[in-house]
Image (cartoon, rainbow, N blue to C red):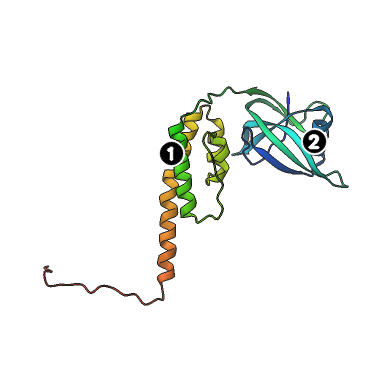
């Protein structure tokens, strides 16, 4: 059985996650992680359900507070699906569950990675982001997933895909839909800024005009 810490977020394997721990049950969980090397799961709470999530390992306790609260850094390890959920882990305050760890086909294609990076660069130009993050090939889809404007449902969908090529294609598809929308918004902003300004139109020649 795996201790569970449900959150309305998606955590990916190898992702570093900073958490502020304030509830008593999760203070107990972090103490167990620190003292016994316990790993725990963060299932995504979405659509009032818990099903998929990522196992995480406590990396370090960055800060402890007098009232028992703490700031911690964790790292995602592997993805699971909950088969049985329990409000309380045996003898503990926190929740737990029986889980099935999922296998993954992580073989990738460099062409898809290059196409994804090209589209990310276009998105960042359209958004005029200063000092955008830089990604080098090879990389994995999870490294960029939180940085291209996916909704929670889209991030969750990505979590459930068990094939890296599928994940890359999914992210490329998302960007190809998103970039034109961002571009249209930028054009709308420019049009709005033109309101109230004198416009210099070229005169139309009606010599050849017929009804």
> How many discs mark residues in the rendered view?
2
Q: Nearer the viewer, residue 18 or 125?
A: 125
1 vs 2, front mark: 1
Q: Residue 33: percent from the left, percent from the top?
A: 79, 31
Camera-nearest residue between 87 and 196: 196
Residue drawn at x 68%, y 40% as measured from the top left: 17
For residue 39, side relative to residue 66 (left or right): left
**Whole-number angstrom distance, CA of label 1 to CA of label 2:** 40 Å
| Residue corresponding to mark 2 | 30
How busy is the neighbourhood of tag 2: few (under 14 within 10 Å), some, or many (20 plus)? many
Q: Quadrant of residue 130?
A: bottom right
**Residue at the image position 80 percent from the left and 25 percent from the top:** 90
Q: Which residue is mark 1?
A: 115
Q: Quadrant of residue 144?
A: top right
Q: Residue at x 40, y 60 (%)?
A: 187
Question: Which residue sits furthest right?
Answer: 66
Dot 1: what SS? helix
What residue is rendered at 51% in x and 29% in y? 164
> Residue 92: image x %, image y %?
82, 30
Report the quarter where the N terminus lies: top right
Residue 159 position, x and y percent, is: 56, 33
Q: 10 Å neighbourhood of mark 1: few (<14), some, or many (≥20)?
A: some
Q: Nearer the viewer, residue 135 or 174?
A: 135
Q: Quadrant of the C terminus?
A: bottom left
Kind of element beneath mark 2:
helix
Direction from residue 187 to residue 64 in the image, left or right: right
Residue 172 numbered tag: none
């Amino acid at each position: 059985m795996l201790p569970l810490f449900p959150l309305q977020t998606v955590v990916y394997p190898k992702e570093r996650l900073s958490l502020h721990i304030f509830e008593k049950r999760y203070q107990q969980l972090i103490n167990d992680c620190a003292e016994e090397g316990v790993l725990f799961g963060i299932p995504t709470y979405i659509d009032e359900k818990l099903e998929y999530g990522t196992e995480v390992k406590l990396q370090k306790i960055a800060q402890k507070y007098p009232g028992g609260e703490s700031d911690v850094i964790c790292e995602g390890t592997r993805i699971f699906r909950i088969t049985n959920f329990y409000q309380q882990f045996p003898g503990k305050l926190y929740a737990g569950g029986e889980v099935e760890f999922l296998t993954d086909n992580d073989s990738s294609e460099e062409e898809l990675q290059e196409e994804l990076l090209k589209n990310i660069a276009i998105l960042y130009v359209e958004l005029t982001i200063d000092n955008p993050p830089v990604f080098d090939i090879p990389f994995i889809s999870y490294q960029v997933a939180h940085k291209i404007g996916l909704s929670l449902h889209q991030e969750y969908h990505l979590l459930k895909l068990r094939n890296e090529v599928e994940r890359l294609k999914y992210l490329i598809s998302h960007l190809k839909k998103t970039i034109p929308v961002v571009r249209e918004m930028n054009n709308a902003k420019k049009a709005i800024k033109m309101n109230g300004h004198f416009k210099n139109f070229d005169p139309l020649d009606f010599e050849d005009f017929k009804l």
